[in-house]
Each structure stands twice: as C-alpha cells, then as structure tokens.
Image (cartoon, grey):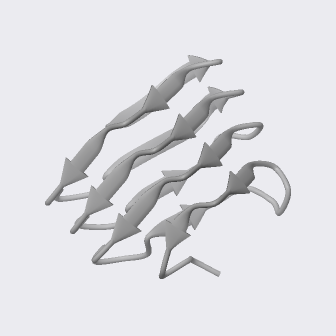
Amino acid sequence: LDLDEATGLLATRNTVKKTAADAIGLRSGCAGCIVAENTTVKAGASGFHVEGVGNTFQKNVAKKSQGFDLTDDTSAGDNVYVANSFSKIAP
C-alpha cells in the first residue's frame, strides 16, 4: 500500500503480508493522514515507511519485517504515534 500524494486520507484496517518492499508507505506528499488499525507481516523492507509530515498513526501492528517495522524519515515530532506495536524502529 503505497500512498504518494494525499491530504487528510483515512487508511484503516488493512492487512498487508509478504511484500517485496515496504508494506505501507506514506511518501513526502502525504500530510494530515490518519493511519489506524493496520497490520503488516513479513514486509520485504519496512512494515511502515513514513516520509510525509502531520500524520497520525494509531493502533497499527508490524511484525517480522526484513528491515524495520517502522522507518520515519521525518524529524522527531513531525508525526503522531499512539498505541502502535513496532518491535524494530529505525534510528
């Protein structure tokens, strides 16, 4: 699930399994989106890869990702994370 250009998008209750690359990606053109209650399993890269700012992530789960469960390329505080389950988070 690769979101390139979106403002105010609601992405909920998706399950993404066994991808070759990132399972769920919010690219730099995504802002003000809500990403909630999604699950990724065995992503080929990151479970969630975030490049956009002003997004809210709530109750998402990523597990068994080849890379990190969460990769957030933005600055600290640019996105909001509430009650997610990510074991491996990129530094």
Identify the image quadrant of residue 73.
Answer: bottom right
The residue closer to the viewer here, 12 or 30, is: 12
Q: Is residue 34 left or right of residue 41?
A: right
Seen in the picture, residue 1 relative to 70 is either above or below; the reply is above
Residue in view at x 75 percent, y 48 percent: 79
Q: Residue furthest right?
A: 77
Seen in the picture, residue 19 relative to 54 is either above or below; the reply is below
In the picture, which quadrant includes the C terminus?
A: bottom right
The residue closer to the viewer here, 50 or 80, is: 80
Residue in view at x 50 percent, y 72 percent: 86
In the picture, which quadrant includes the N terminus?
A: top left
Q: Is residue 18 left or right of residue 88?
A: left
The residue closer to the viewer here, 64 or 51, is: 64
Seen in the picture, residue 68 relative to 39 is either above or below; the reply is below
Q: Position of residue 30 (x, y in %)?
A: 61, 29
Confirm whether residue 54 shows in the render: yes
Identify the image quadrant of residue 2.
Answer: top left
Identify the image quadrant of residue 54.
Answer: top right
Confirm whether residue 22 shows in the render: no
Residue in view at x 49 percent, y 55 percent: 49
Across the whole image, how many numbered discs are drawn on residues?
Answer: 0
Q: Position of residue 43 (x, y in %)?
A: 25, 64
Q: Position of residue 51 (x, y in %)?
A: 61, 47
